[in-house]
Image (tube, rainbow, N blue to C red):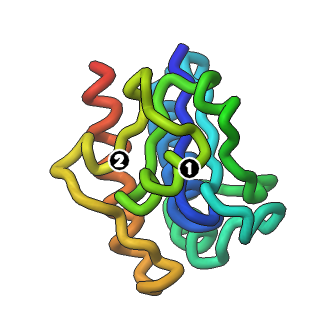
Amino acid sequence: MYNIMFVCHGNICRSPMAEFVLKDLVKKRGISNQFVIASSATSREEIGNPVHQGTKRKLLEHGISTDGKYAIQFTKEDYHSYDFIIVMDSYNIKNLKYIIGQDIEKKVYKLLDFADGGDIADPWYTGNFDDTYRDVVRGCEGFLRHLGI
């Protein structure tokens, strides 16, 4: 069983996009039962809010629903509950360290570490959900390759 937590600043754009993309990919491979996949925020700004409309629209274009998802904050306890804590950019790592301290167990990765490196641009600021989706899919596919799936 793989326990995966995706993390971004607010948990309304990138991390829920990654959560639901990976859920869709493992479902299509028939291996959903091998995964627990969630997402959360480093900040408290959006706690309780639904997924951003741009993320919802982009995922619905690909037949992926985000129904029932509301922003939650990552906790220090989450660090011990998940095997992989996958953030969207370097800024997320910095903020995550305020919550967890050191990554002693080496669980924290950027999503694009599993592809060609770099950060996933925040569509909250760019307005470009197409590029974010493309990068999230590349990262999630790379992550599955990393697991040998």
Q: Where does label 1 land, which residue? A: 98
Local secondary structure at mark 2: strand
Q: Residues within 10 Å of mark 2 (few under 14, many from 20)?
A: many
Whole-number angstrom distance, CA of label 1 to CA of label 2 = 17 Å
Vertical arrangement, residue 141 with respect to residue 91, above or below: above
Q: Is residue 18 visible?
A: yes
Please state which amino acid type lies under the numbered disc 2: Lys
Q: Residues within 10 Å of mark 1 (few under 14, many from 20)?
A: few
x and y percentages locating residue 14 in the rendered image:
51, 62
Q: Quadrant of residue 104?
A: top left
Q: Which residue appears at 36% of the width and 52% of the height?
A: 137
x and y percentages locating residue 40 in the rendered image:
64, 50
Q: Which mark, by number, is residue 110?
A: 2
Q: Which residue appears at 42% of the width and 56% of the height?
A: 88
Q: Nearer the viewer, residue 11 or 99?
A: 99
Q: Quadrant of residue 140?
A: top left
